[in-house]
Amino acid sequence: MKLYRFITGPDDEVFCMRVSKSLNDGWELYGSPTLTFDGNTPIAGQALTKEVPNESFHEGIDLRSH
């Protein structure tokens, strides 16, 4: 099963650490990062995917636990 998630947040060290942790937990970058501006702060986004063997998709999947 393939999982997808999109991480967003202020473009700062915390955001970069969240993406880095996800990469080290087996997630892979999906596409290019995005960047927008909310009038005060740059907001970054990055899509990630992860292949999870031996599991079936269901609506209650906790993406943070994978």
Image: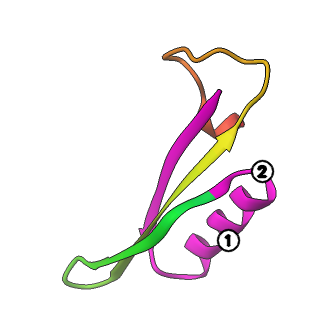
Q: Is residue 8 magenta?
A: yes
User: Which residues, given as a range, are shown in magenta?
Assistant: 1-28
Residue 6 point in image, percent of width and height:
47, 52
Q: The C terminus appears in which quarter of the rendering? A: top right
Which residue is denoted by mark 1 in the rendering?
17
Give the SS element for disc 2: loop
Q: Give the quadrant of the N terminus.
A: top right
Residue 40 drawn above or below residue 27: below
Q: Residue at x 67, y 43 (%)?
A: 50
Observer-nearest of 40 and 59: 59
Q: Secondary structure at mark 1?
A: helix
Q: Is residue 55 left or right of residue 19?
A: right
**What amino acid type should be assigned to the residue bearing mark 2?**
Gly
Q: Position of residue 44 (x, y in %)?
A: 42, 73
Question: Where is mark 2, residue-wise?
Answer: 26
Q: Amino acid at mark 1?
A: Met
Give 53 or 11, whichever is nearer the viewer. 53
Between disc 2 and disc 1, whose residue precedes?
1
- The 10 Å Cα crowd at callout 1, few under 14, some 14 to 19, many 20 or more, is few
